[in-house]
Image (cartoon, rainbow, N blue to C red):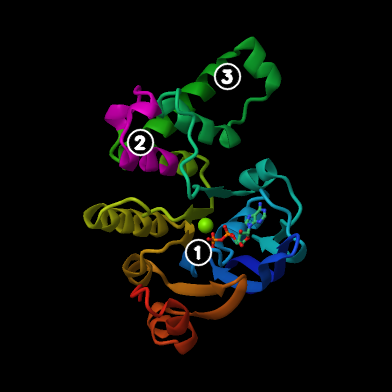
């Protein structure tokens, strides 16, 4: 594996019947970067995330995370290995509170086993307290600590997005996958999200970002991979991507770049 690479993807393909959702996708993601994956609707971006998180089994190809092969592992093993994600469409437990949702994210980090949980040993109670404190810290960081005991269903969209992000961070991942996190946000909110993503990177996490908001992508990404109909057509730093003719051609008319 290339030095400093946290994720290395080779010849990744995924077919759904006759649809080639991904075809020969390759990338090397250096640790500590914001690495964006862009492309028109249907380009395969979500499928790429699904392959990385074990939601979908790749048809062919290899995925190495921190020098260990990932392809074919179930989702929970991949989460334990240190990959967390948010979803293009928010997926929260609506009737649970904000804090409860974030505690769900913490569970991969819990260390007390089944006997401890059943017997409610002191070690188990200490563990619970530690997880609650960690969850509250994540809520504070996302400025939603005051909403901790509200049911998620009672919150506006922006706050729900923040809960999702807090839950992903609570798993203490090394690699965070964000699937269109700015969708539905206004310009000011998108700016705040950008700052938050950069602060997450500063703490040493690597971020994989799927996003349609090109100004956000160009502002905060170190590297950009462009997919079109599942095929990688360009990769490089934002400025180079903005000037790439193939990329301009697929976005022509959308005024996205
Ligand atoms: N579970 C699935 N079954 C069949 N086709 C799928 C499935 N998931 C995605 N696809 C197809 O794969 C292609 C890529 O989809 P997707 O990864 O969602 O693209 P993007 O996220 O870039 O918009 C599309 O043609 C889509 O219809
Ligand atoms: Mg998608």
Q: Residues within 10 Å of mark 1 (few under 14, many from 20)?
A: few
CA distance separating discs 3 and 2: 23 Å
Q: Total label count?
A: 3
Residue 9 horizontal/vertical position (percent): 66, 68
- Residue 77 placement (x, y as % from top left): 69, 44
- In the orientation shown, which residue stands out farthest toward the top? 119
User: Residue at 55% across / 72% down in the picture?
Assistant: 227
Q: Is ligand 1 less than 8 Å from the beta carbon at label 1? A: yes
The residue carrying mark 3 is: 124
Residue ID at (69%, 64%): 19
Nearer the observer: mark 1 or 2; the answer is: 1
Q: CB of mark 3 within 8 Å of CB of mark 2? A: no
As measured in the structure, the alpha-carbon distance from the residue carrying label 3 to the one carrying label 1 is 46 Å
Mark drawn on residue 110:
none
Is residue 1 shown to the viewer in this render? no
Q: Position of residue 80 (x, y in %)?
A: 63, 43
Q: Which residue is mark 1?
A: 41
Was residue 157 drawn as part of the magenta stretch in this picture? Answer: yes
**First in sequence: mark 3 vs mark 1:** 1
Mark 3 crowd level (few <14, some 14–19, many ≥20, 10 Å Cα): many
Q: Earlier in the sequence, mark 1 or mark 2?
A: 1
Report the magenta residues as a range.
145-165
Element assignment for label 3: helix
State the residue position of label 2.
Answer: 139
**Regarding ligand 1, which quadrant of the image does it lie in?**
bottom right
């Amino acid at each position: 594996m290339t030095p400093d690479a946290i994720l290395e993807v080779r010849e990744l393909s995924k077919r759904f019947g006759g649809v080639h959702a991904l075809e020969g996708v390759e990338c090397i993601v250096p640790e500590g970067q914001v690495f964006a994956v862009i492309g028109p609707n249907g380009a395969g971006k979500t499928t790429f995330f699904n392959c990385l998180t074990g939601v979908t089994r790749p048809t062919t190809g290899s995925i190495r995370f921190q020098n260990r092969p990932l392809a074919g592992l179930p989702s929970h093993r991949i989460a334990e290995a240190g990959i967390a994600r948010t979803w293009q469409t928010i997926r929260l437990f609506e009737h649970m509170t904000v804090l409860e949702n974030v505690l769900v994210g913490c569970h991969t980090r819990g260390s007390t086993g089944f006997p401890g949980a059943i017997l409610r040993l002191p070690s188990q109670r200490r563990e619970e307290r530690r997880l609650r404190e960690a969850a509250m810290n994540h809520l504070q960081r996302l400025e939603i600590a005051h909403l901790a005991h509200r049911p998620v269903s009672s919150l506006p969209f922006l706050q729900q997005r923040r809960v999702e992000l807090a839950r992903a961070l609570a798993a203490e991942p090394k690699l965070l996958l964000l699937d269109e996190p700015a969708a539905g946000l206004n310009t000011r909110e998108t700016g705040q999200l950008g700052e938050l993503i950069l602060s997450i990177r500063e703490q040493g996490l690597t971020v994989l970002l799927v996003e349609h908001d090109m100004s956000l992508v160009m502002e905060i990404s170190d590297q950009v991979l462009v997919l079109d109909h599942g095929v990688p057509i360009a990769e490089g730093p934002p400025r180079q991507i903005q000037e790439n003719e193939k990329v301009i051609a697929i976005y022509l008319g959308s005024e996205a770049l």
